Image: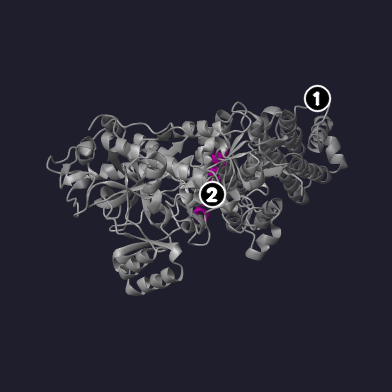
Amino acid sequence: MLSRIAESLFWLARYIERAEGTARILDVNYHMLLEESQASYRLRWEPLIIMAGEEDRFRKRYSEVNAENVFEFLAFREDNPSSIVQCISKARENARTIRDRISREMWEDINGFYHMATGFDAREEIAAGPHRFCDRTKFGSQRFHGVTDATLPHDEGWQFLRVGWALERAEMTARLVDVQYHNLLDEFGLAGAADNHQWMAVLRSVGAYEAYHRTYHPPIEPERVAEMLILNPQHPHSIRFNAAEVQAGLRAVSGTGMGAYANEAERLAGKMVDRLSYDRISEIFSQGLHGYLTDLVGMCGAIGDDIARTYFYYAVVA
Amino acid sequence: MSVSPVNHLSQGIFEGYDTGGFYDEMFSSPGHPRPPYAKVFQKLASMAPVHFEARRRLADISFLIQGITFTVYSDGRGTERLFPFDLIPRILARSEWERINRGLSQRVVALNHFLQDIYGEQSILKDGRIPRSLVYSCPHFRREVIGVNVPHGIHTHICGIDLVRDSKTGEFCVLEDNVRTPSGVSYVLENRLVMKRTFPDAFQAAEVLPVNHYPSELSRILRSLSPRGTDDAQIVLLTPGIYNSAYFEHSFLAQQMGIELVEGRDLIVDGGTVYMKTIRGLKRVDVIYRRVDDEFLDPLAFRADSILGVPGLMGAYRAGNVALANAVGNGVADDKAIYAYVPEFIRYYLGEEPVLRTVETYICAKRADLSYTLEHLPELVVKAVGESGGYGMLIGPDADSATIERFRERIQANPRNYIAQPVVALSRVPSYDANEGRVGGRHVDLRPYCLYDGKDVTIVPGGLTRVALQRGSLVVNSSQGGGSKDTWVLRGED
């Protein structure tokens, strides 16, 4: 497989996942706030901008942090490279450069997704609230997963998609937990879980609300929520689950067996899986959640870099 | 499929259709379809216009979702546009097609002989059948490939020869030979697909010859060129990338043939061999179906500023380590001044008379032709010899005097760069005009795609019918408001 194609598959998956993740968070945040006091608005919307790493850009553009502005910025803005529409456009652009290598169904699906996303009238959607737009985005992303799974041979190209998807999702979940904890704990403290709604919203944003209730007894405890999202071995949005996916995908490409690694990306993925398999949530909290998650995000970045070094880039030979 | 009842006297979308004094391919006279069109006319005319319009919209959506677009650069951003598709098919009778097929095959073989000769022995120059100066002054004549042995002596693997039907005689003649990197065949295949989905009933009733064997035939030919034998030949399609107007076609053909679609940056030449950069290291490439023009292929041999090409590619080509299709240097054969000599090539190399007529051509490099051209500019079409896509052209009867004078100066400054031809009144085929909500006669041409394997020429029945969708326009190019139609060659005898 051409290096350029592997790279496009990897980024195609990452952009789609980023669009979906952003949509989930937007939607959940909005609905949670319908039941909130006006005073807490800024507090609730700011973390979303921080998560996206786009504070500077946002401030240059808007004077106020409110639902309409954040929604517009994260969903539609052309000058925000991580807006949902931009992510979908970039995913489609990547697909377009490799449309001979993906299935016809995949191409038509993502192309339709793109036309759907760019066809929304931003002003009308902002007036109506983010639910419709976010729902379509989530559904579009999930459908693309399904179409991919059902029509693309599960060969090495598929493994690059799988790694891209999982790596992006691991990072998104780590940022989500980090930002929400920081925010909510500042306000209420660990014990003051009076704000049940907030934690429900965090769980809902990754579709883990029902699963949480099957795993733990009520009430919703912040530490359990963190455990669910970081360490759960089965939930498709937990960091551990996705680290294992990254590791499995990388091994499938290189053909490396258990207990060994063929490159730095595999070493780091293995290390991540091990930590997430054997660390306890109490240990994580006592050493500091923020530091722990920052570490994981850093590892995700390093894995991405080494995948590029190993598989995508050729040194220029004169 | 339900069809709403319409008045028996009504002709649906054809109501009030006017053939306008042109050769109309569908109607011999108003309301009377020619035999090959009889069944389609019956189906379409019995359909309520709103139902036709509904199917047309479905077809458009289908093209959009499939991303069958081309890119236009006039707005500076490179916008993707749909290539407008007209749902009324263009139909050729079997006997008519057989004659076209014979004429094109003959022409492709003669063009190939010419290229093999001109980059080899040059016997045609020695025998004085074409002026040496005309060949050597051609900007697409590549001295770099003189003496290069191409696999099986094939230069013209893929040709897209443009034909028009002269309204005066009703006869098909050749307008230009595209023997470099002709595009458009993907539309032939996609139009057919959409047509079959949109009008399955009309399609089936007409008994149309299939076209979808094109990719496998092309793939077979490419495979046969491999310098390492055909079993494990690595074949790639070299594209300039997603910003090229024909990118859709490049990816489409690569996918249909199951070959790798590469850009220049995916390839590297080492020790006179071409490799592609894969996730498992370098892998040797044997055959390149290149959709990059000669001058951009190799910055070491041609344009040094090209970033689309592969440094060292020409070295590997000359050494016979990689095959290119089409061969390098073909542009000399589709130069518009050389065009006038193709009938001569057919006589010289094949000892046959041309089956298809060419359009009378005045070569401004010749003194007598030049003075005739300058005296008759308002009646003539003037073309720059190396241009394609409808650019660099003067249509005398439509031009104002300032434009004519501008061309006069240009021609006088560089006569070799121009030829002139009488205006050919193109035939028309009824086409749906969405703005007017009805059918009008629109001018068409025909580009069949010819594949040559060194022995036989294979042409998928029909080809691309391009249609000038604007009323009265003669320009069929997609970049200038043209669209296309599905082209049917009927199975049955006429």
Direction from residue A245 to residue B2 in the image, left or right: left
- Chain letter of the residue beneath label 1 in the structure image: A
Left or right of residue A129, residue A218 in this image: right
Which residue is painted at 53% across and 45% down in the image? B121
Element under label 2? loop
Which of B2/B185 is in front?
B185
Where is the N terminus of chain A found, in terms of image quarters? top right
Q: Is residue A75 visible?
A: no
What percent of the width, then of the height, locates residue B387?
45, 58
**Observer-nearest of A230 and B77:** B77
Q: Are the residues under badges 1 and 2 in a single subunit?
A: no
Image spot of residue B438 (x, y percent): 24, 50
Seen as rendered, the residue at the extreme right is: A287
Judge whether B156 appears above or below A250 on screen.
below
Is label 1 in a helix, a strand or a loop?
A: loop
How many numbered circles are shown? 2
Q: Magenta region: which residues?
A: A125-141
Residue B329's tag is 2
Q: Mark 1 belongs to which amino acid? A: Met
> Where is residue B288 drawn, in percent x and y?
58, 40
Mark 1 to mark 2 CA distance (whole Å): 55 Å
- Within 10 Å of the Cα at label 2, are there few (<14), some (14-19), or many (20+) other Cα atoms? many
Q: Which residue is mark 1?
A: A258
**Left or right relative to B457: residue A308:** right
